[in-house]
Image: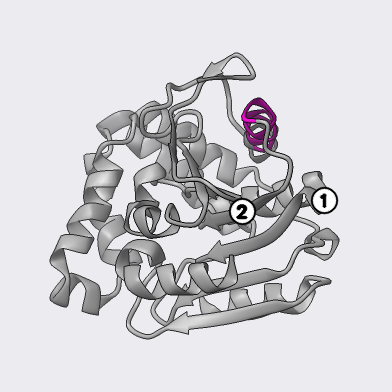
Amino acid sequence: MQVNGKEYAVDRDGGGPPVLFVHGLGGTSSFYQPQAAALAERFQVIRPDLAGAGRSPVAGTPSIEDWVRDLVALLDELDVDEVRVVGHSMGTLIAQELAIALGDRVSALALLGAVKAPGEAGRAANRDRAAKVREGGMAVVADAIVGAATSEATRRDHPERAAFVRELLLRQPPEGYARSCEALAAAAEPDTGKISAPVLLLTGSEDGVGPPAVAEELAGRVSQDATVRVFDDVGHWTAIEAPGEVTRQLQKFL
């Protein structure tokens, strides 16, 4: 569908109160595939591929602010007034800014593997990753990301889950992924205290990207009720590595 003059691929399932799912860097709407069917029994599940990711074409130079504007326009196009929002990784920065922008229109906010805006080292690393992908494609980073961002238990006991993460990465348009890396490098820290919705933070004990300490810090900064849940032996790709646990927590919270 057309959103702010861009072509967005959007999966919509189920009926009931709307829930918007925002994927992270290297993800697509399919990141939430393990949760979609269960949640669609009670909710209208809305899962876009952000511009430049998955099936949504590369369009312009994205930023966190641009994606927020696109998601606001998407919700308006779908006549969604009140919405629950779920974000993962880089998508937690987008989800927080969206909750701030929409105010009381966001009734609940769930953050999976929540991250902070990168510091100087992180900005340089993201720009370096963008350069590598432009030169060599997604294959030059996919295996390293799977090795670093999934838990040892996932790779050993559930190799199909690690393979799913790898496939999500390899299916990314390299230029879109590179521009997303640069958007993350330029991201600012959201003013979390302005979030008016209750917040659920889910992360893995082995998540080195959005570790439990970050979740606890964010929980202490929000102005409303915040709950933190940590899953043992789970890395950063939370919804894929702990599909049943994430689904149950989201069903209860949303």
Q: Residue furthest bottom?
A: 232
The picture quadrant where one finds residue 236 is: bottom left
Q: Residue 146 vs residue 28: left or right?
A: left
The numbered disc on residue 85 is 2
Q: Assign the magenta stretch its main secondary structure.
A: helix
- The amino acid pointed to by label 2 is Val
* Crowd around label 1: few <14 · some 14–19 · many ≥20 (10 Å): some
Give the residue displayed 43% in from the left and 52% down from the top.
Answer: 40
- CA–CA distance in space, label 2 to label 1: 12 Å
The residue lying toward the viewer, choosing from 135 and 69, is: 69
- The amino acid pointed to by label 1 is Gly
The numbered disc on residue 95 is none
Provide the secondary structure element on which disc 1 rests: helix
Give the residue displayed 66% in from the left and 46% down from the top.
Answer: 187
Residue 60: percent from the left, percent from the top?
Answer: 56, 19
Q: Is residue 4 above or below residue 204?
A: above
Q: Which span is picked out in magenta?
A: 68-78
Q: Is residue 114 magenta?
A: no
Give the residue displayed 23% in from the left and 79% down from the top.
Answer: 153
